[in-house]
Amino acid sequence: MVGKDRFTDKVAIVTGAGGDIGREIARQFAREGAVAVIADINPEAARETKGLIDGDGGRSLAVQVNLLKSEEIRSMVRTVLRKCSRIDILVNNAGIGERSTLLETREEMWDLIMAVDPGSVFRCTKYVAPEMIRQGGGKIVNIASMMGMIGMGAPSYTAAKGAIIAMTPIVAAELGPHRINVNTVCPGFIRTKLNRDMIATPIGDQIIGKIPMRRIGNVSDVAALVAFLSSDDADYINGAVIPLDGGMGRFLDLGEDYRTYDPFRGTKE
Ligand SMILES: NC(=O)c1ccc[n+]([C@@H]2O[C@H](COP(=O)([O-])OP(=O)(O)OC[C@H]3O[C@@H](n4cnc5c(N)ncnc54)[C@H](O)[C@@H]3O)[C@@H](O)[C@H]2O)c1
């Protein structure tokens, strides 16, 4: 257990908490006193997360839910309220992706990514926010991606994460008067099972060379920011879209020759 107890007796739903990033977010909430609700379609992965939290002495509730289905989300909300009485935090973390060019992208895959990524953010927020309004406030954190901010990755995934980024300020404006903060985190390359193997190849070194912090992010980097945004310390942060990419997404490296070339040379004394 860590010393800080920012979430004592709070109830935090983390979608996709059977996956690497969601698991660490859920564990962080539980370490700081929350009941972590592990909402995932994959019951085995959810059980694994629950086992880790229980092993740490934390409190958790695993709920199997297909976030494509509104009825399952509404049933999850009812289950959480029945067992935990309240919902203070919602982290819309579940997401899927792919690696196709536009010409290779299958229409079914485009539709699925849109339905899971921004679709689940829409549906979960729609069915959880009324409860937060009743309670007098709450915190909602979405997980988008650096790839939703810049031209990188598959068009489907970029568009899906871009939709989450685009909806953030307007949803924040709607829910802000109810004391509900809505913010979005955009991770860059994070060490997860999805890209662990790739990072171990020379591609990993190429990527690290383009990250100003010269390292791949860790799941704990994401969990730390999500926990901060879910805490009272972030009460005045609303509608923010925050890159978490070691600085990678907002500069263009034109190479050493460009960096060292001085176009004002001739004009200097
Ligand atoms: N891994 C990275 O480097 C990285 C970078 C930027 C953003 N992200 C985003 O972070 C989030 C988590 O990524 P991850 O690497 O932990 O992914 P992951 O694949 O390990 O975990 C995603 C989880 O979501 C669940 N899920 C998928 N579809 C679902 C559905 N219909 N209903 C319920 N649950 C469903 C899966 O079962 C899985 O447990 C995703 O939104 C991803 O796009 C990841």
Image (cartoon, rainbow, N blue to C red):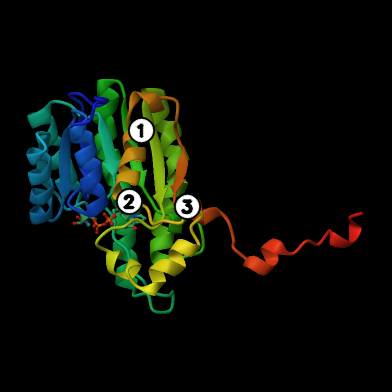
Q: Which amino acid lies under the numbered mark 2 shown in the image of this protein?
A: Asn
Between discs 3 and 1, the one toward the N terminus: 3
Q: Which amino acid lies under the numbered mark 3 shown in the image of this protein?
A: Met
Residue 60: which quarter of the image? top left
Between discs 3 and 2, the one toward the N terminus: 3
Where ligand 1 lies, by image quadrant? bottom left
Q: Dot 2: within a 10 Å radius of its alpha carbon, few (fewer than 14), some, or many (20 or more) residues? A: some
The dot on residue 218 is 2
Residue at image coords 29%, 55%: 95
Q: Dot 3: within a 10 Å radius of its alpha carbon, few (fewer than 14), some, or many (20 or more) residues? A: few
Percent across and percent down for residue 102 are 44, 74
Label 1, on which residue? 228
Mark 3 touching mark 2, by CB under 8 A? no
Percent across and percent down for residue 90 are 27, 37
How many badges with numbers are in the image? Answer: 3
Seen from the viewer's position, the closer of residues 17 and 207 is 207
